[in-house]
Image: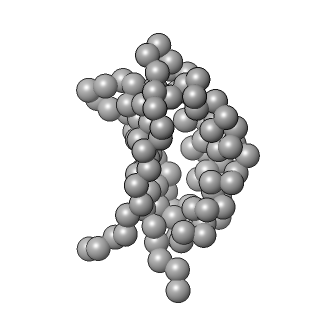
Amino acid sequence: MSKMLTVVARVRAKPGKEEQVREALMALVEPTRKEAGCINYDLHRSQEDAALFLFHENWISREALDKHLQMPYLQELGAKAEDLFDGPVEVTLWDNVS
């Protein structure tokens, strides 16, 4: 049986690219929320650092997440990452324990 998976992904915009990154990340929200297996997909921005963004995501299974990672809109953003992001996207996977 598959179990729910939580993803936390942190993205830091390059200096001067904060609004471009916000727009690019916002463009992922609507199509991702429509994907089979997406429970929630929420984008946050730090109150203390306008260049720092965080996705909090829940998926019904690892398989659903793996399908998400292959979506064309995510692949397209990945191709622009070097120009927009200050370093790699930090992704951690979590299991609910309570």
Answer above or below: position of 54 versus 51. Answer: below
Residue positioned 45% across, 27% down in the render: 86
Q: Position of residue 59 (x, y in %)?
A: 51, 64
Q: How is the image coloured?
A: one colour
| Residue positioned most to the right | 72
Where, by quadrant of the figure, is residue 52 drawn?
Answer: top left
Q: Position of residue 66 (x, y in %)?
A: 61, 62
Where, by quadrant of the figure, is residue 54 drawn?
Answer: top left
Answer above or below: position of 40 versus 15. Answer: below
Q: From the viewer's side, name the closer residue of 74 and 89.
A: 89
Q: Position of residue 50 (x, y in %)?
A: 36, 23
Answer above or below: position of 79 versus 69. Answer: above
Residue positioned 70% across, 38% down in the render: 76
How many discs appear?
0
Does the rendering let one see residue 6? Answer: yes
Left/right placement of residue 44 relative to residue 64 reads left
Q: Position of residue 80 (x, y in %)?
A: 64, 30
